[in-house]
């Protein structure tokens, strides 16, 4: 994650050497103001970018686990590709979607390394990119407020567990056996 942050730090560099900011300056967009307004969204974009490969593999494995006989039966019943996708593939991939949702939620809740590498002043500018793990770090390490940092850590753990349980329990379906 740190290496991804360093790479995108060069892409987003506001000093005129960043690829993206140099491109945006061609259209009159101020690099510093853009990063102040869209800092958290740019970090979320990096999180999504770095995770795409994992999710491609996850969904490819999920799709390969669907028996070909189900698709053959749907074609014989007269279903077209769109119907097969929405009525066969998506319902049979719901367990994979749930697992992917949990992974993505945990990744989003713990964007500590990326925020620390990409943001100004550890969650800046003006706290615009501060996420809960960064606040835990600031409270516990910088300000030596260990009780508050511990409470935030417990809250993060509880939120993560609740999110995972709710995501995995939602929409129980019978599994397909082959």
Image: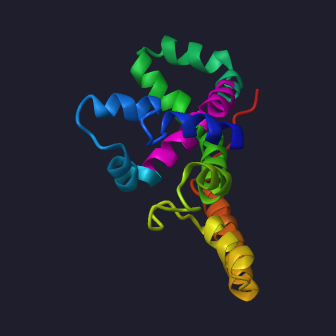
Q: Locate residue 125: give its quadrant.
A: bottom left
Relative to 137, 85 lies left or right: left
The answer to whether residue 24 is seen in the rendering is: yes
Residue beneath the point at 47% across and 16% down: 77
Residue beneath the point at 59% across and 54% down: 115
Residue beneath the point at 75% across and 84% down: 146
Is 50 inside the magenta-drawn segment? yes
For the C terminus, give its image quadrant.
top right
Of residues 77 and 168, the one drawn nearer to the viewer in this rendering: 168
In the displayed structure, would residue 80 be above or below residue 91? above
Of residues 84 and 161, the one drawn nearer to the viewer in this rendering: 161
For the N terminus, give its image quadrant.
top right
**Colour scheme employed for the rendering of this structure:** rainbow
| Magenta residues (range) | 41-60
Residue 74 spot, x, y in % from top left: 51, 18
The answer to whether residue 1 is seen in the rendering is: no
In the displayed structure, would residue 163 be above or below residue 139? above
In the displayed structure, would residue 136 be above or below residue 10? below
Is 125 inside the magenta-drawn segment? no
Residue 93 spot, x, y in % from top left: 60, 35
Q: Locate residue 123: give its quadrant.
A: bottom right
Relative to 71, 45 lies left or right: left
In the displayed structure, would residue 141 be above or below residue 38? below
Residue 16 spot, x, y in % from top left: 42, 35
Q: Farthest residue in the left direction?
A: 28
Residue 152 spot, x, y in % from top left: 66, 78
Magenta: predominant secondary structure element? helix
């Amino acid at each position: 994650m740190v290496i991804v942050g360093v790479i995108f730090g060069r892409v987003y560099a506001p000093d005129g050497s960043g690829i993206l900011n140099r491109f945006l300056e061609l259209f009159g967009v101020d690099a510093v103001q853009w990063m102040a307004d869209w800092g958290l969204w740019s970090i979320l974009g990096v999180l999504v970018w770095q995770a795409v490969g994992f999710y491609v593999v996850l969904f490819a494995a999920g799709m390969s686990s669907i028996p070909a006989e189900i698709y053959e039966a749907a074609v014989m019943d007269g279903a077209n590709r769109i119907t097969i996708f929405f009525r066969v593939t998506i319902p049979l991939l719901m367990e994979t979607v749930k697992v992917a949702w949990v992974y993505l939620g945990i990744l989003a809740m713990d964007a500590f390394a990326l925020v620390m590498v990409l943001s100004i002043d550890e969650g800046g500018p003006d706290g615009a990119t501060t996420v809960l793990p960064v606040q835990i770090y600031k409270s516990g390490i910088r300000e030596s407020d260990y009780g508050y940092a511990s409470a935030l850590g417990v809250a993060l753990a509880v939120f993560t567990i609740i999110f995972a349980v709710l995501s995995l329990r939602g929409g129980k379906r019978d599994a397909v056996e082959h």
